[in-house]
Every structure is written in C-alpha cells, then in structure tokens.
Amino acid sequence: MLIPFFNLYFFYNIVSGNRSLINIHEDIFLLILLSFVLVIIYVFFNNIYGFNSILFTILSSFSNIGLALETNFSNLSLLFLILTIIGGASFSTSSGLKFIRLYTLFKFSLKEIYLVAKPLYVSSNTLFLSKNKIKDEEINIYFLSIVFFILSLFILSGILSLHQIDFKDSLTLSILTITNTVNSNNYNLGDFNFLGLNITSKISLMTFMIIGRVELLGLLILIKKFFFK
C-alpha cells in the first residue's frame, strides 16, 4: 500500500541504489504526516482497534485503495475520509486532492496573512524546503483543482440525494467515487447496496469516477485546446 502513496521515482531510487535526496522532499513530508497520524490514532485508539488494524486502514485511506479488515471504525470514519481526500504524492497512482496542492495553498495562504499583518515581511517561496520555487500559475491551477473537486462533490451528492439516499451516505459515497476509493467499513458504507440504485445514479457514479481519475480541470483544458482554438 506504500507504492500508491509515495512518488513512483522514490521507489525507483531505492531499487536503483540512488541515495540522492533530490526530488524526494514531498515523500519525506508525506512520511512525516503518515507517522504523525499513525501516532495520534495509536495513542488514543490502540486499546480499541489494535496497531495492525490502524496501520492497515490509514495506508488504505491515504493510498485511496479503501480495503478494510473486519474491524468497524465507526468512530474514525470521518478521519479516514479526510485522509482519502488528501491522497498521496503528486506523481503516484493515488487519487485525492494530492498533498502537494494542499501544502502549496496552505503555505500561500500563510504568506498572504503575514503580508496583511506585516507588509514588509519577506517569506520563502520555495517548495518543500528545496530550491524549486512555487509559481503563481501553479497556485492558480491547484486552487482551481480544489474548486472543481468541491463542485463535483456537491453535484454528485445532490444527484444521489434526489434518489432516496440520505445526505450523509450520499456525501460519503460521492467522496469515495471521485477519489476512486472502494466503499468499506472504514467509511461505514460496507453494506451499501448498489443494486438498489436507479440507472441515473449508476451513470452518475461511473461518470464522476472517470472525472475524478482524469480530473475535470484536465478535461476542460483538452476541450479548450481542441474545440476553442
């Protein structure tokens, strides 16, 4: 489950024996985030679920696999949904918003807040403590990606809610659909009956699975390139 979580070239460097830390700063930050989440959940819930179950579920959520053990994580389903939304590295097979986008927008937001409070404040514009600088075009693209994600989420959950699915299940199912994650006990949807859905809901789920995988922003760029030259 670590393979879909980290960048693909991270494992290539390990296999090839390349010990250079170049281009793996994102993986280091992801490892820190993974360790932090694992420690927090282990400290508070180890007596209830056990370390193996916690580790398996965290990796399954981060990597957007969604597989679950027989354990029912009813108290942690919201946290696992958040991990599913975050996803893994930028150059990985996981879905979600991607950690690099959230990190970049968070750093940009802090920079803007500091500039309002202290106009003469000079902040670093680098990415992951490396020499790579964050460009304004990249920030705009990351912001639009999150906007399209939220928009797709509410459109799909609205469609599902219109067909006798309660709002909680429709919102959870929409998140899992857009992130291409298997519904399971991790998110309290292990017993969801897809056979009972009507044709409109099924088509909507399949459509947004494709949109979530290739990303709506990419589709709009392709449409603009080929149809609005």
Image (tube, grey):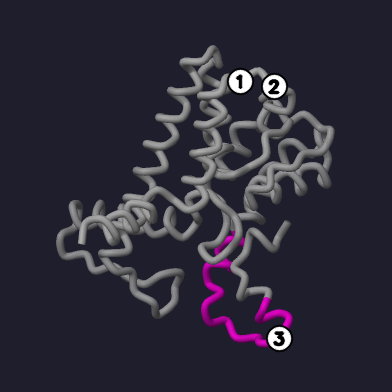
Of the 4 image quadrants, the one containing the N terminus is: bottom right
Mark nearer the viewer, 2 or 3: 2
Q: Position of residue 9 (x, y in %)?
A: 61, 75
Q: Position of residue 171 (x, y in %)?
A: 51, 27
Q: Which residue is mark 1?
A: 197
Magenta residues, as a range?
12-32
Q: Check residue 193 in the rendering and tell me which mark sits there, or answer none.
A: 2
Q: Does residue 118 appear anywhere in the picture?
A: yes
Residue type, numbered disc 2: Asn
Report helix, strand or loop for mark 2: loop
Q: Position of residue 193 (x, y in %)?
A: 69, 22
Check if residue 16 falls in the magenta segment. yes
Mark nearer the viewer, 2 or 1: 1
Marks 1/3 in contact by CB < 8 Å: the verdict is: no
- Residue at coordinates 73% horizontally, 28% vertically from top-left? 190
Marks 2/3 in contact by CB < 8 Å: the verdict is: no
Report helix, strand or loop for mark 3: helix
- Residue at coordinates 42% horizontally, 42% vertically from top-left? 149
Q: Position of residue 185 (x, y in %)?
A: 73, 31
- Residue at coordinates 40% horizontally, 48% vertically from top-left? 216
**Label 2: how many residues lie within 10 Å, few (<14), some (14-19) or many (20+)?**
few
- The extreme left residue here reads 119
